[in-house]
Structure formats: C-alpha cells, structure tokens
Amino acid sequence: MNIIFLGPPGAGKGTQAQRICSALSIPQISTGDILRRAMKEGTETGLKAKKFIDAGQLVPDEVIIDIVKERLAQDDCGKGYILDGFPRTVPQAEALDTFAKIDCVIELSVDDQVLVNRLSGRRVCLKCGATYHVSMLGEKTTCDVCGEELIQREDDKAETVLNRLKVYHTQTAPLIGYYERKGLLRKVDGDQEVDAICGAILKTLGVRA
C-alpha cells in the first residue's frame, strides 16, 4: 500500500508514520532523510542537491522529485511505503503521479491553536534529545534522563509556529483539495492520544490494529 501523510507542523506525522510503517512492514520515506542519504552516498541527484545546499539555496523541485523517484524504485518499496514530507505542493503531486500510484492519503487534522499550544510548550534537551511539554514539567527545568537544562527551540516559539502554519496553509494545504478530488483523501482527527490516532489510521486503511 502506497500512502501519503499530510498535516501541518506538529500534527504528529512522523510519529504516526513510524507506527504505521512498523504495523505494515513498509518503509517511511522522509524527504529530509533521503536527501541527506543521497548526498552522503554521492548519487548523481545527491551531488546536484549538495551544490544548492552548499550555496545556501533551496533544492529545486526537479532535484527533489528525482531523489524521491530514485528512492521509490528501491526493492524495499516493492510492497508499499509512506511518504512523509512529500509532496509539499500541487506541482510536486502532479510530478509524483507520473511515476507512482498512490493508494491513500491520510490527512492528520488538528486545529491551529492546538498546534501552537503543543509546539510552543515543547522543551528539548540538547544533550540527549529527550522532549517534554511544559504542561507535564511543573517547576522542573532539567532533563529526567541526563540532568541537562531544557530549552525551547527557535522553531517552537509561538511566532515561528504561526509563520510555519501560514506557510503550510498557503503551499501545502491545496494538496488536500487535489487528493480529495481524486477520491484518495481520508481525514483523521490528530487531536487525540497517540494510540487512538494510530488505531484510527489503521482502521481507515482497513488494517486490524
């Protein structure tokens, strides 16, 4: 089964993709991961991407599309995959249609204010990577794992989160209409407990939890 996960920043796409991939025994295809992998392995498209990144420029669509195409052609994608972070725009989706057959698009739907509260309340330990939320921390400001101080990342500050959501609604949200018209879109409430969301996605896919 070939699946796309859509949803705004903080909706939990990565977490749910890992769980569903494990349940279905298929790989999670994250654009950032395959981009780094292609550059590390020195593939032709990876080297093209590296030139843009080294020059401080955005990697153009055609290079990203070629890297995704390369990855989906690998053996482990034969029984399906989950695309997380691609496509981001309708032109990318149209390009994807030329070399992949998508079976289902899962949209994790979460209200903007919930996302702002979720992300702006996140605190991270830079040493071990442990993540917490202020609602669970109380007066505590250090990591339970290694004792280091917890910080709020720039990406998680309320004004930055609002900007990221604005970009999402402008660039990526039109994909919802694109896949809805194709009859592939399935909406799942992303404002639930992690296990409940996972169960809802599996049910939507017709898979027993």
Image (cartoon, rainbow, N blue to C red):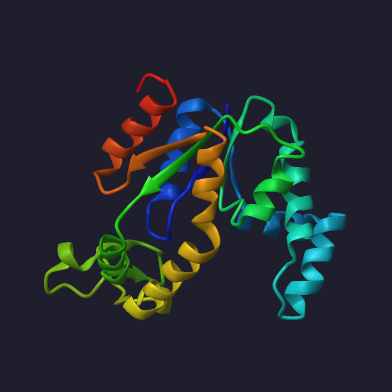
Taking the view exactly as shown, the residue that stands out farthest to the left is: 138
Can you see residue 40?
no
Rendered location of residue 120, percent (x, y):
30, 71
Q: Quadrant of residue 83?
A: top right
Taking the view exactly as shown, the residue that stands out farthest to the right is: 44
In the image, what residue occupies the spot 55% across and 63% down? 171
Q: Quadrant of residue 48?
A: bottom right
Can you see residue 194?
yes
Specify whether 39 is left or right of 199: right
Q: For this rendering, which residue is in front, 2 or 185? A: 185
In the image, what residue occupies the spot 49% across and 56% down? 173
Q: For this rendering, which residue is in front, 102 or 1? A: 102
Specify whether 170 is left or right of 50: left
Q: Quadrant of residue 40?
A: bottom right
Rendered location of residue 124, percent (x, y):
34, 69
In the image, what residue occupies the spot 71% across and 80% down? 56
On-image quarter of the C terminus: top left
Specify whether 56 is left or right of 196: right
In the image, what residue occupies the spot 73% across and 73% down? 53
On-image quarter of the N terminus: top right
Rendered location of residue 25, percent (x, y):
54, 27
Report the number of discs.
0
Q: Is residue 25 above or below residue 122?
A: above
